[in-house]
């Protein structure tokens, strides 16, 4: 695996010093150029927690992936670049307030003066590292903070228009990619998985987000959303034009 080729995949340059602002730029560019997508899941193409296979898919085939792929490979890159990074597990809170299967989301912690949560694989969420100290961070997708729940767990919280929503709960215990095997299988095959029902492809933009869900395309720009319905031909064009995915390459 070639880290320079991976950096070029999301229009990033090799960095010489490992400051927070450099990490912020890497995360933002990664989320703008490498989409979160479940197209293999929907086409019953097995996803394996093997970094070489993930690298081949994301870098050489210019695809995206879901959390294990995106954060698994991004964690590898950060470690190669010299960051003090580790994988962690999280439990996602669904929009209806119930909890998804425990510890089936993979994210990253990076240590500077304090720990920062870095997540390039959650879809519609912050594009910047968030400190575990409780400070608020605002970008075009909302205002975020991390709140300590008890001696073990923390919540990632998004605030929008005075409403609060827990996105997920996590601990700081280090995980290896192989530890997510059960969750990776669950999210590929279970009817209770969020990823086994419709095609989902999404990426950040400079001032919002663009999302393909089944045959609906949603654009968010500066807090304003527009939605359009797509024909099958339109959908193929959107995959190529907006996400850089060749529809003929999908199995």
Image (cartoon, helix red, strand yellow):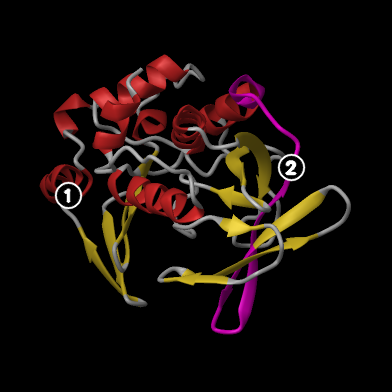
Q: Is residue 67 shown above or below 48?
A: below
Give the mark, 1 or 2, whose residue is nearer the N terminus: 2
Q: Is residue 98 magenta?
A: no
Residue 90, percent from left and from top? 67, 43
Give the farthest residue toward the right: 151
Q: Secondary structure at mark 2?
A: loop
Q: Report the number of numbered marks.
A: 2
Front: mark 1 or 2: 2
Sort mark 2 into few (<14), some (14-19) or many (20+) by Cα contacts within 10 Å: some
Residue 35, percent from left and from top? 33, 44
Q: Secondary structure at mark 1?
A: helix
Say which residue appears at 19% left-offset and 50% top-offset.
242
Residue 33, percent from left and from top? 28, 46
Gap between marks 1 and 2 measured at Cα: 38 Å
Q: Is residue 97 shown above or below 106?
A: below
* Nearer-the-camera pick, 127 or 197: 127
Residue annotated with mark 1: 238
Say which residue appears at 20% left-offset and 44% top-offset.
239
- Is there any visible trace of residue 199 in the rendered image? no
Span shown in magenta: 157-180
Q: Quadrant of residue 198?
A: top left
* Nearer-the-camera pick, 101 or 150: 150
Residue 126: numbered disc = none
The quarter in which the N terminus is drawn is: top left
Say which residue appears at 22% left-offset and 65% top-offset.
228
Residue annotated with mark 2: 172
Q: Is residue 159 magenta?
A: yes
Say which residue appears at 49% left-offset and 36% top-offset.
71
Sort mark 1 into few (<14), some (14-19) or many (20+) by Cα contacts within 10 Å: some
């Amino acid at each position: 695996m070639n880290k320079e080729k991976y950096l070029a995949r999301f229009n990033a340059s090799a960095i010489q010093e490992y400051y927070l602002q450099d990490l912020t730029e890497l995360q933002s560019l990664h989320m703008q150029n490498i989409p979160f997508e479940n197209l293999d899941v929907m086409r019953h193409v097995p996803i394996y927690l093997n970094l070489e296979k993930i690298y081949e898919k994301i870098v050489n085939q210019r695809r995206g992936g879901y959390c294990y792929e995106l954060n698994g490979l991004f964690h590898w890159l950060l470690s190669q670049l010299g960051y003090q990074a580790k994988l962690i597990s999280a439990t996602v809170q669904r929009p209806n307030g119930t909890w998804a299967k425990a510890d089936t989301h993979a994210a990253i912690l990076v240590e500077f003066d304090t720990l920062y949560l870095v997540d390039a694989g959650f879809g519609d969420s912050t594009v910047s590292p968030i400190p575990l100290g409780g400070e608020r961070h605002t970008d075009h997708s909302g205002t975020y903070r991390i709140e300590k729940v008890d001696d073990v767990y923390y919540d990632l919280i998004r605030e929008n228009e005075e409403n609060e929503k827990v996105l997920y709960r996590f601990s700081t215990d280090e995980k290896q990619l192989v530890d997510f095997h059960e969750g990776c299988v669950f999210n590929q095959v279970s009817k209770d998985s969020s990823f086994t029902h419709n095609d989902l492809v999404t990426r950040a933009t400079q001032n919002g987000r663009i999302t393909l869900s089944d045959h609906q395309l949603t654009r968010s720009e500066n807090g304003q959303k527009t939605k359009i319905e797509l024909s099958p031909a339109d959908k193929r064009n959107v995959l190529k034009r907006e996400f850089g995915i060749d529809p003929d390459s999908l199995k």
